[in-house]
Amino acid sequence: MSASPPGVLAAALAERLGQRARWRPIEIAFWVAAVASVFLLPGKHIILAEIAILALFALSLDLILGYAGIISLGHAAFFGFGAYCAGLFAKHHLINEPVLALGAAGLAAAALGFVTSFLVLRGSDLTRLMVTLGVALMLREIANRFDELTGGADGLQGVGIAPVLGSFAFDITGHVAYVYALAVLAILLVLARRLVHSPFGLSLRSVKGNALRASAIGIPVNARLVAIYTVAAAYAGIAGALLTQTTAFCSLDVFSFERSADLLLVLIIGGTGYLYGGLIGAVIFKLMQDWLATMTPQYWQFWIGLLLVAIVLVGRERMSRWLDAARGLVRLR
Amino acid sequence: MPACCSSIQGEIMQRTRTVAILAAVAAAFALGSAQAQVKIGLILPMTGQQASTGKQISAAARLYMQQHGDTVAGKKIELIVKDDGAVPDNTKRIAQELIVNDKVNFIAGFGVTPAALAAAPLATQSKVPLIVMAAGTSIITERSPYIARTSFTLAQSSTIVADWAAKDGIKKVVTLVSDYAPGADAQKSFTEAFAKAGGQVLAELKVPLAAPDFAPFLQRARDASPDAIFIFVPSGQGGTFMKQYAERGLDKAGIRVIGPGDVTDDDLLPNMGDAVLGTVTVHHYSAAHPSPMNKAFVAAFENANKFRPNFMAVGGYDGMHLIYEALKKTSGGTDGDALIGAMKGMKWESPRGPMSIDPETRDVIHNEYVRKVEKVGGQLYNVEFATFEAVKDPVKAQKK
């Protein structure tokens, strides 16, 4: 007559998971706005492409920071590795088609992520900060040292990128670059959504909550961390490859400490653990930077610092509470 | 997956059409407004390590506009200054935005070689003339037919340093350069010319471009006990080098400093201390250059800015002059080919002395001066004592 208790539990669980994974109206609104920007802001496509790339990069950090609790100050290692891979693939005509090259760069970064993940398993947050930072610094110096391959401090010269899917050539106006970057971001976000709403994603959250208890209920903690770190590295590598492909250029700056640090700022602005934090943070961070640097090319860093301090002091929670209050007021009327 | 890809493809195609129409409309508008205005996008490192370059060039460009008016051949000149922090990725994006969105007629500035190299393909693609006001690697002007240079090349001064040093009795030298293209240029030009003149290079050292610590390299140089150190660092790093040189006691060990004039940059020279006295460098510009034109330039610059102009400032000043004169020749026409054509072979008197643009390579031709750091009126200056006239870039001359 009735299903056995475990069956009921499983069904209830599946329903809960399904509910969590459902597309909410605000998410749909976000993507409608993103697609609208393609048509409505043709003059802004160059910076929008850069925002989409930063958003993907931030999404990658969110996967490990927001879902597995791994803090990193060297995420640019994977970004830079992907960037140089894509640059070298194109320069030496190893893989000409950009989408394929993007995938290959992602795989290469994933391999690097897999190898370095074992370093990150050890130790606490502080150790992880140092280890990740160290890996990025090392890669930067390696790229600097092998200047015959990478161009050293002069950057990788003579990168020519073939048309996307054989028919859309990158143009100076950045239209193709933006649509391409946005499409990649959208596809990878959908994949990330599936990932974090799966039982695998839930097990990550329990690891983040309490690794000891998680292992006590049978979750293989280390294997889970290695897996998500590898996936995040692939995401970061793809973001880096996108940067190289859309600018036909790549320099040592892709490995820089500032890039990793900026990424943490992006997540601090946007928030972690709900996937859109990196996207929203990237939009705010880049637009703010662009606006301030235009207003005052010499002192913009001061103002950006001030704004960041203000954002952290006020606190995102308080801001979202204000938003909720505003929404409540609207509903009352 | 295939469904989503085809929808994206369709979307791209549809969008490309919309954008093409929008672009045509925008271009029509731009054509209308461009008649009265000429825009110059000045991309400079205004922040970060190379910030002094940006500060010097933007000040010099503004001074030029103040002295010569902001209207040329009936066109109003608009200067748009952007900060790239000397990061080539930024330079490229900013140049692209300036060309596409702001519809600039010139891009200029470029604090370091990698920045200029990154922007070069955009000049070719858009036929917008690119004026190099700071970067000094020989290859830059070969990267696009739309590049002209008013700064200098490292090879111009480095070969002359070598000849002068050999004649002055310097036999053994350790070279110490920043590890990027201009450093390699300087090292190679010096070593070749010095060997030809009968000198010996004991060691070739390279320091990282970003945040260098010279101490360990200076120690190695000292251990080799040469007669002199040949040094190239980009503008802005000379102060750190001279400080560490004095701290390590190399001045007392009788090891002299020679090199292109970047190390005794006029911007930092006043604060370098007495260890720098007697340093002999070769360069195209010194704030102490004794021409009446330069005296007037330095006075006006110091009056407006409270600091001394250096070779970067004069590169910016001459770059603006080149743009103004080219516009006069084309009667305000902004066609890229016509403008670059007008620049080729142009000659004028600059605060640095007589200079011209090589009609074949679009590179700078100017005098190189041998100078020694001395105290003039209680202040440190590079005092010129010998002149090599109308020096072309030796790297390009060799290729012929």
Image: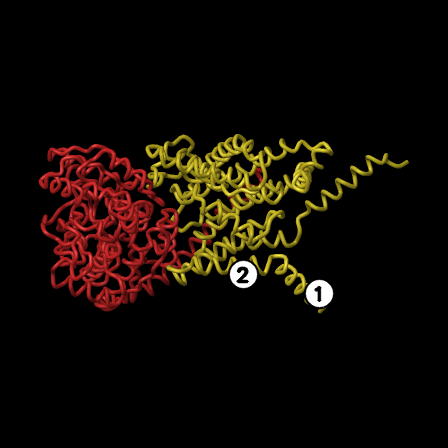
- B46 or B207, nearer to the observer: B207
According to the colouring, which chain is red?
B
Q: Chain of mark 2?
A: A
Find residue A181 and report its horizontal and vertical position in percent.
49, 45
Residue beneath the point at 31% across and 42% down: B214
- Give the residue displayed 21% in from the left and 32% down from the top: B202
- Position of residue A20 relative to residue B101, above or below, is above
Residue B267, can we see it? yes
Q: Give the residue furthest to the right.
A: A1
Q: On the rendered image, what quadrant is the C terminus of chain B found in?
A: top left
Which image quadrant: the N terminus of chain B? top right
Is residue A58 found left or right of B240 in the rendered image?
A: right
Q: Secondary structure at mark 2?
A: helix
Q: Is residue A233 left or right of residue A255?
A: right
User: How far apart are the alpha carbons under marks 2 and 1?
Assistant: 29 Å
Type of the residue with mark 2: Ala
Q: Position of residue A247 (x, y in %)?
A: 40, 45
Question: Toward the viewer: A274 or B347?
Answer: A274
Q: Which residue is mark 2?
A: A310
Q: Residue at the location (17% across, 44% down)?
A: B156
Neighbor class of circle 1 (other Cα within 10 Å; few <14, some 14-19, many 20+) is few
Q: Are marks 2 and 1 in contact (CB under 8 Å)?
A: no
Q: Are marks 2 and 1 on the same chain?
A: yes
Disc 1 marks a residue whose amino acid type is Arg
Residue A331 numbered tag: 1
Residue drawn at (26%, 59%), measured in percent from left and top?
B334
Give the colouring mode of the picture. Answer: by chain
The picture's colour for chain A is: yellow
Spot occupied by residue B129 in the image (x, y as percentages of width and height): 27, 53
Whether residue B149 is visible here, answered yes or no, is no
| Residue B280 vertical placement versus B328 (above, below) | above
